[in-house]
Image (spheres, rainbow, N blue to C red):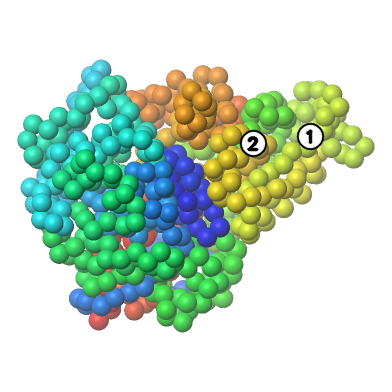
Amino acid sequence: MNHPPSSTSAEPARSPSGIGIPLCAALGALALGLTACTSGTTPATTAGTQQQQSTAAVRQGGSIVIGAEQEPDCADWFGTCGGSIWGSYIMETPTIPQVFVVRKKGSDWVPAASDLMAAEPTITAGAQPRITYKLNPKAVWSDGQPITSADLKYTALQVRDGKNIFDKTGYTEIASVDTPDPRTAVVTLKHPYGNWKTFFSGEYGVLPSHLLQGKDRNAVMKNGYTFSGGPWKIQSWNRGTSVTLVPNDRYWGAKPRLDKVTFQFTTDTAAAFQAFRTGQLDALYPSPQLDVIDQIKQGLPGTALQTDAQTGNLEALWLNDSRFPFDSVDVRKALAYAVDRKAIVQRLYGPLGVTSPNQSFNSPLVSGYAGTDFSQYSLDQAKVDQLMRGAGWARGSDGIWAKDGRRARFTIVSLAGNKRRELTEQVLQAQLKTAGFDLRIQNTTAANLFGKVAPNGDFDLGLWTLVDSFPEPSLDATFSTSAIPSAANGQTGINFIRARVPGLDPLLRQVANSTDDTARRSASLQADKLLAAYVPSIPISAVPNVLLWNKRVGGPIAINPVEGPWWNLADWGLVK
């Protein structure tokens, strides 16, 4: 998904979503010494991951209050205003049915057909593949009306043909939707599309045609909606304060154990932790700011902790390839050798068990499609000197590289007030000065960065996180030339860095379109090699997730890196 996020940041997503997804992120902990203040811990073997399960029995009834770092702008998940990941976490996922959900299989998170389906959807091969969906006859909306093939058709055409749609990725490949009977929908594609499982899943799900057809969808949904096809209904949305969910008594699956869940907007991290410490909040999903780490280090009695480094969050240095000096591949490579990525990762996450940089732009969520080609770049001043001098640069009396009267001076932009990012920038500034580069820092708001600066290419170097919101590879959204915002594509796309890597587009198209997973993996690994050869940008690190909850709350509590920490909220309850 693509949404604005935590209290101080909004990040772009690159999956079938849009722009401005938050850092649904936080920490990865092993070496924090927290076991004394947790309830039964079983650390996983993966570095940066600590899993805890609540084994206590829970009772029926009661209510809890959860801290939410961000209030969404609106609840029209199709609209350009519906890009908040927290909106998805607290309202969309609990109420909007999806064809595919994301569940863990072995060590991987994979798409799995939901209980909305009577059977796994199937796809036929060919120049125009057809996807057949068979709906569960028990599935109904909260008004008792059945969920039908007409709902899938309405959803598909709203996204494909609608205006002011958050992201149409994939849906533009839909040629037609047929509804031979109320429980069967057949989607015919214009071309093969490898990420077809994202349809009616991930970002959008399925909406009720009998309530929305012929109406202004945005007007009906933007301030919250009364319908539901999930285990919960939205009881109220008090702008600026909270969202309250109550059980959907018409839900065909297992009913929620709790009578009510309130998400209280607590955008200030210090205030959120104070409320959590005093029992005003029962759970938190904090983004990885330095003060969060400090709070956890101090210990939180009566608290359980779960962290997971296998996330879709990938932080990188984003180089504007169309601007001096990064319009030179030699300078980009020199920068990759000038930055000590391992030192940065250890400084930020070392105490949390995450110590190695990412060596691909594919996040851990899609690690099966990732190479390790960026491992060739580590701190090496000799290679910096070789590349820069070979490209005609020379160090001046101040130690800064210069060429044709222009110095290697550039500005980095990130999110103002984000202490973790500011620390990263300060470390970068010192590292690059030693290597002969003059880095200036000029941060801004999330709205300005992702609404104007980045889309317009009005930056030299950026520091932000991209988020994979479905376990399918999607680097085409970040690096294909067709994703460069322009008048030709309506200023859409998140190739903000204006990357134009020779030979990359056909590989990314194969990754996106092929339904042969072996071919997709091969093309993805080849794409990774090209990206490392041309260094259009520099991956730094995955940003892990963390979940904290009061031990009076129980259930099979677990982080889902795609659907968030509340994906199975219906199974939560108060300990007996």
Query: Badge 2: how crowded within 10 Å, few (<14), some, or many (20+)?
Result: some
Relative height, residue 195 to residue 563 (above, below)? above
Relative to residue 273, is residue 257 drawn left or right? Answer: left
Q: Position of residue 64 (x, y in %)?
A: 33, 74
Residue 212: % across, % down: 22, 45
Residue depicted at x 9% and y 40%: 183
Q: Amino acid at mark 2?
A: Asp
Callout 1: 10 Å neighbours few (<14), some, many (20+)? Answer: some
- The N terminus is located in which quarter? top left
Label 1, label 2: how many angstroms apart (C-alpha)?
18 Å
Q: Secondary structure at mark 1?
A: loop
Which residue position holds label 2? 458
| Residue denoted by label 1 | 408
Q: Residue at x 41, y 24 (%)?
A: 509
Q: Nearer the viewer, mark 1 or mark 2?
A: 2
Q: Earlier in the sequence, mark 1 or mark 2?
A: 1
